[in-house]
Image: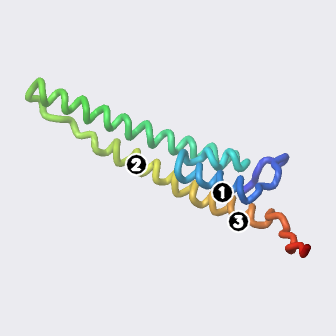
C-alpha cells in the first residue's frame, strides 16, 4: 500500500499507537496517523457508514416501541438496517486490522540499533 511521499518512517512506538487507535478507537484513524491516506479514507468512510446505519436501526426500534405503546399498529421490520450496519463496520474493522499488520511490519525495520552495554 502506498503511503504519502513525504512521510517519515514510523518508529515502533508510533506504529503501536496507530494500531491501537485503528483497532480500539476508530477504524481508519490510525491508518491516517501512519500516513496511509487511501486505506484510512476507505476504512473511516465504511466505519462511519456502518455506525450511522446501526444508529438508524436503533431509532427505528425506538419508534416501533413507542408506536406499540400508544397504538395497536404492528411494528415495521427494521432488523436488516442493523445487520447491514454491523456488517459494514466489521468490514472496516477487518480492513484496518490488515492495515495495522502492514504498519507494524513496516515499522519493524525502523527500529533503532541497540548499543551494547558499557562497562565502567
Give the labeled residue for mark 1: 16
Q: Please tell me which of labels 1 and 3 falls first in the chain.
A: 1
SS state under label 1: helix
Label 3 environment density (alpha carbons within 10 Å; few <14, some 14–19, many ≥20): few
Q: Residue at x 59, y 49 (%)?
A: 21
- Position in image of residue 24 (x %, y %): 52, 51
Q: Residue at x 89, y 73 (%)?
A: 118
For residue 93, side relative to residue 78 (left or right): right
Label 1 environment density (alpha carbons within 10 Å; few <14, some 14–19, many ≥20): some
Q: Is mark 1 in CB contact (under 8 Å) with mark 3?
A: no
Q: Nearer the viewer, mark 1 or mark 2?
A: 1
- Position in image of residue 2 (x %, y %): 75, 54
SS state under label 3: helix
- Position in image of residue 105 (x %, y %): 70, 65
Q: Quadrant of the N terminus?
A: bottom right
Say which quarter of the image contains residue 41.
Answer: top right
Q: Residue at x 65, y 49 (%)?
A: 31
Q: Please tell me which of labels 2 and 3 falls first in the chain.
A: 2
SS state under label 2: helix
Q: Nearer the viewer, mark 2 or mark 3?
A: 3
Give the labeled residue for mark 2: 86
For residue 92, side relative to residue 14 (left or right): left
Give the labeled residue for mark 3: 105
Label 2 environment density (alpha carbons within 10 Å; few <14, some 14–19, many ≥20): some
Q: Please tell me which of labels 1 and 2 falls first in the chain.
A: 1
Q: Residue at x 60, y 60 (%)?
A: 98
Amino acid at each position: 500500500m502506498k503511503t504519502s511521499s513525504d512521510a517519515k518512517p514510523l518508529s515502533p512506538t508510533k506504529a503501536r499507537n496507530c494500531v491501537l487507535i485503528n483497532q480500539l478507537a476508530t477504524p481508519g484513524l490510525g491508518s491516517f496517523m501512519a500516513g496511509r491516506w487511501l486505506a484510512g479514507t476507505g476504512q473511516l468512510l465504511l466505519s462511519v457508514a456502518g455506525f450511522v446505519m446501526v444508529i438508524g436501526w436503533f431509532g427505528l426500534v425506538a419508534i416501533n416501541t413507542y408506536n406499540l405503546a400508544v397504538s395497536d399498529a404492528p411494528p415495521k421490520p427494521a432488523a436488516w438496517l442493523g445487520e447491514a450496519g454491523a456488517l459494514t463496520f466489521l468490514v472496516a474493522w477487518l480492513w484496518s486490522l490488515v492495515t495495522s499488520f502492514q504498519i507494524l511490519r513496516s515499522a519493524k525495520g525502523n527500529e533503532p540499533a541497540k548499543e551494547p552495554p558499557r562497562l565502567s
